Image (cartoon, rainbow, N blue to C red):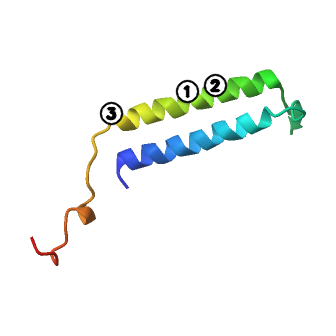
Amino acid sequence: MTKREMILFLAGAEAFHTLSHLMLAAPGILPFRYGKLTITPQLNLAAILFNAGATAGLLFWASSTERKLRPEFHGSPHTVQ
């Protein structure tokens, strides 16, 4: 796995995390307690903004990372050139 692929994987995980917080923003869900932490609409909004920013930052980082072809995609010794 290349560095760029790892960054894109993490960006996808952050995007999913952002979507999960967007789902919590549905009417009637907040506030709720998670252990000793109470998730309020304001805290959830902060989490949405933070995770969306992290997603955008990771995608920007991935776009500025050089694309490298992995060796298995450069051709096989069994292919006719």
Crowding near pointer 3: few (<14 within 10 Å), some, many (20+)? few
Q: Earlier in the sequence, mark 1 or mark 3?
A: 1
Q: Secondary structure at mark 3?
A: helix
In the figure, residue 8 lies in which quadrant? top left
Please say if the residues under marks 2 and 3 sit with CB atoms less than 8 Å apart: no
Q: Residue at x 46, y 35 (%)?
A: 58
Left or right of 3 on screen, residue 35: right
Please name the residue that numbered disc 1 is placed on: 53
Q: CA distance from mark 2 to mark 3?
A: 23 Å
Q: CA distance from mark 1 to mark 2?
A: 6 Å
Please say if the residues under marks 1 and 2 sit with CB atoms less than 8 Å apart: yes
Crowding near pointer 1: few (<14 within 10 Å), some, many (20+)? some
Query: Which residue reaches farthest left?
Result: 81
Residue type, mark 2 in image:
Leu
Considering only vertical position in the picture, is 69 above or below 27? below
Residue type, mark 3 in image:
Ser
Please name the residue that numbered disc 2 is placed on: 49
In the figure, residue 30 lies in which quadrant? top right
Residue 64 is labelled as 3
Percent x, y for residue 79? 16, 75
Q: Secondary structure at mark 2?
A: helix
Quadrant housing the N terminus: bottom left
Q: Residue at x 81, y 25 (%)?
A: 41
Residue type, mark 1 in image:
Gly
Quadrant housing the C terminus: bottom left
Percent x, y for residue 66? 27, 40
Percent x, y for residue 76? 19, 72
